[in-house]
Amino acid sequence: MAATSPRAPQELGPGGKALWRAITKDYELNAVQQVQLVEACRAKDRLDKLDLILRGDADTWVDLVHRTQTEDYEIRIDDALAKANATGNLLKQLLAALRLPDEEGKKPQQRGGARGSYKPTAAPSGKTAASSGKVSSLDRARAAKSGA
């Protein structure tokens, strides 16, 4: 349990403040985790607004356009649903990045960074990769292109 819960940033909406309080009352966060939590709370507020748009007045996300040249009507649908899905995914990733311990006090596994490039497999001295039985996909593509 956190000794003293830091105050929620003033700009947060009700959903973001509720998320802030729920996490900071039980966990003591370092500076990096606090930044991640602020972003997660902002994402929660955006998600709440997008949900209101999607459940509310269709005029905010659907538009009927009349084309006078062709006398056709076109229905344009805002990408609020796609934004809501993306924001929901962002919120999930931010909360997972906090690596808060579970009920038993265990933290989720720490994932490593990028692996970098792989080293090519060296063929035994005096042999080529093809003669040693190790052929890369690039070697196969080159051989197919040359007709070999």
Image: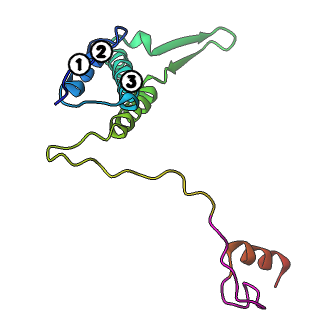
Residue corresponding to mark 1? 18
Label 3 element class: helix
Crowd tier of the residue under label 3, counting other residues whose Cα lies within 10 Å: few below 14, some 14–19, many 20 or above: many
The residue range painted magenta reads: 118-134
**What residue is at 21 percent from the left and 20 percent from the top?**
4
Tell me which amino acid carries mark 3. Answer: Ala
**What residue is at 24 percent from the left and 25 percent from the top?**
24
In this rendering, the answer to whether 24 lies above or below 113 is: above
Crowd tier of the residue under label 2, counting other residues whose Cα lies within 10 Å: few below 14, some 14–19, many 20 or above: some
Q: Earlier in the sequence, mark 1 or mark 3?
A: 1
Q: Which label belongs to residue 43?
A: 3
Look at the magenta stretch and give its main secondary structure: loop
Observer-nearest of 147 and 73: 147
Q: Position of residue 45 (x, y in %)?
A: 35, 18
For the N terminus, give its image quadrant. Answer: top left
Q: How is the image coloured?
A: rainbow
The mark closer to the camera, 1 or 2, is 2
Q: Earlier in the sequence, mark 1 or mark 2?
A: 2
Q: Verify CB contact (< 8 Å) between mark 1 and mark 2.
A: no
Label 1 element class: helix
Q: Position of residue 87 (x, y in %)?
A: 41, 29
